[in-house]
Image: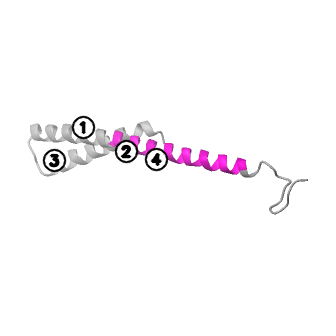
Amino acid sequence: MNRKNIPLLLMLTAGAVTCIITYLKKYPVNTQLIALFVVLVVFYILGNVLIWTLGYFEKQNEEKRAEEGEVIEKDSENPGQEAGQEQE
C-alpha cells in the first residue's frame, strides 16, 4: 500500500464512523457536520504524523543497515586469510 494513502484512508474511515454514530444518536445536522469536519481534520493530521514516524524509523533502519554493511565489508578485505594465520 502506498504510504500517501494512509491519511486518506484513516480520515475517511473515522468520518464514516462519525457519520454513523451521529446519525444513530439523532444529532442535529449542524452538529453532525461540525463533528464530521473536526474528526476529518484531526485524523488527517494524525495520518500525516503516522507517515512521518514511519519514514523516520525507516531512515534509522537504513542507516543501521548501511553501518552493518560497512563492517562486513571491512571484515572481508582478506578473504583468503583465516583467523590466526599471518600473511607471508
**Is-magenta flag for residue 52?**
yes
Look at the image and say whether residue 53 sits in the magenta stretch.
yes
From the image, tell me which residue sits under label 4. Answer: 57
Determine which of the numbered discs, if any, sits on residue 50 in the image: 2
- Comes first in the chain, label 1 or label 2: 1
In 3D space, how far apart are the residues under numbered discs 1 and 2 (Cα atoms)? 14 Å
Instruction: Say which residue appears at 85% left-offset and 57% top-offset.
Output: 86
Of mark 3 and mark 4, the one earlier in the sequence is 3
Q: Position of residue 76 (x, y in %)?
A: 76, 51
Mark whose residue sits in front, 4 or 2: 4
Q: CA distance from mark 4 to mark 2?
A: 11 Å
Q: Which residues are magenta?
A: 47-74
Residue identifier under label 3: 22
Q: Amino acid at mark 1?
A: Val
Q: Nearer the viewer, mark 4 or mark 1?
A: 4
How many neighbours does mark 3 have within 10 angstroms: few (below 14), some (14-19), or many (20 or more)?
A: some
